Amino acid sequence: MRFIKNGVTAPIGFKANGLSCGIKKLKNSDLALIYSIKMCDAAGVFTTNKVKASCVVVNSEHLKNGKAQAIIANSGNANCMTGKRGLKNSRTMAASVANALGLNNEDVCVASTGVIGHPLPIEKILNAVPKLVNGLSRKGSEGAARAIMTTDSTLKEIAAEFRIGGKRVRIGAIAKGAGMIHPQMALAPHATMLCFVTTDASIAPSALRSALDVATQKSFNMITIDGDMSTNDMVLVFANGMAENKTIKENSKDARVFGAALEALFLKLAQLIVRDAEGATKFVEVRVKNARSLRDARTVAHAVSSSTLVKCAFFGSDPNWGRVAAAAGQSGAEVDPWKMKIYLGRELVLENGGAVKKRAGILDKVFAKKDIKITLNLGLGKHSATAYTCDLSMKYVQLNSAYHT
């Protein structure tokens, strides 16, 4: 596998565009469109928050048949908690694109991100759809990626190329997210994180859903910035089959190759989101080893990476490993303090239920770095998991205390 350029338009048959329709101030881009010239097998994972945005509800309906051909997404307004009007507006967005492209309404997915509780300025979107469609281009991925940004400071766009049965296959993706990031997404009919994925692979629907679920669990569902789950989180993946490879079947060798490529892209995007976290000064990897079960490994990794006290210690460059141990112990997973070992970077700091003596200043140097690694060896089994997080800075508090409501 090799990484390539052009994001969601790298795969054959996909076009994209992004522009300003006037939702955001200062005429910043706020409306994106991704389109496949051929009908796609499609799947999505969505927030498990019980308060769901209208777009999540509508997409769950539209993807019941596992088919789709376009995605329209706006930023600057979440269209969440906007009642029946919000649902109508999401459906109207889809219908306007469907009409312009000659598709069925159900073949268009919708996404929104921004402030909760404000009516969506649907007329601005509808007025911009003709220009949005006319501007579709094989070079439009960057414009679409920019149009879905809210508090993001960096563009999140990626693509990769690999071989399946002798055929060249490509996967491309764009994403957004910098705050309100603690995704816990599940397969359908089951500041925000959005990810839109395109591929020209021919892949069976069951294999596509399986690859999406596994890749999401190992990447986006293992990141946290502030512990707040969005109402709009989603990952959508479209496969149009134009690479003309032999159709990838579930549990096959080709499925493993495709799945590994998707995981690699998702992991890079997930890490980009954490690195772009609002106010963050540190990027932190929390690895849990030798847990009794995979669930326990993920639970401990989440607990440590989500701990407010641990995140404050990161910001203060304070190697307070006691906070790490406490977070693991209260996680609900099986933890034995006499068997657990904790490493800050490569430095062993906890063993046999007590501190390991270190020379003064060694641990301070570990936490002074911009990239920090923490490892917890639970000593109870063979399962592992890795979570990614950041520090909690004063700037984060300032940004979110001043955020427009």
Image (cartoon, rainbow, N blue to C red):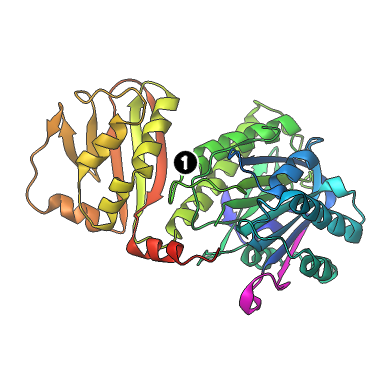
So how many labels did they put on this image? 1
- Residue 287 horizontal/vertical position (percent): 35, 38
Chain part drawn in magenta: 15-29
Q: Quadrant of residue 382?
A: top left
For the residue pair 279 and 92, the one nearer the viewer reads as 92
Where is residue 1 drawn, in percent x and y?
A: 57, 47
Q: Nearer the viewer, residue 57 or 251?
A: 57
Q: Is residue 292 magenta?
A: no
SS assignment at label 1: helix
Q: Residue at x 84, y 47 (%)?
A: 107
Tell me where residue 193 appears, x and y as whole percent: 57, 51
- Give the residue type that dot 1 points to: Met
- Asked if residue 20 lies in the magenta stretch, the reply is yes
In front: 270, or 242? 270
The residue labelled by disc 1 is: 222
Q: From the top left corner, tell me how far across and down residue 214 is, in percent.
A: 57, 34
Q: Establish if 166 lies above or below 273.
A: above
Residue at the front extreme? 83
Question: Looking at the rendering, in which quadrant would you find the C terminus?
Answer: bottom right
Q: State the residue at coordinates (68%, 64%).
A: 144
Left or right placement of residue 205 versus residue 235 in this view:
right
Query: For the residue carrying disc 1, how many other residues have a C-alpha within 10 Å: few (<14), some (14-19), or many (20+)?
Result: many
Q: Is residue 54 visible?
A: yes
Residue nearer the viewer, 403 or 150: 403
Q: Residue at 59% across / 43% down in the picture?
A: 262
Visible residue check, residue 201 = no
* 78 left or right, relative to 102: left
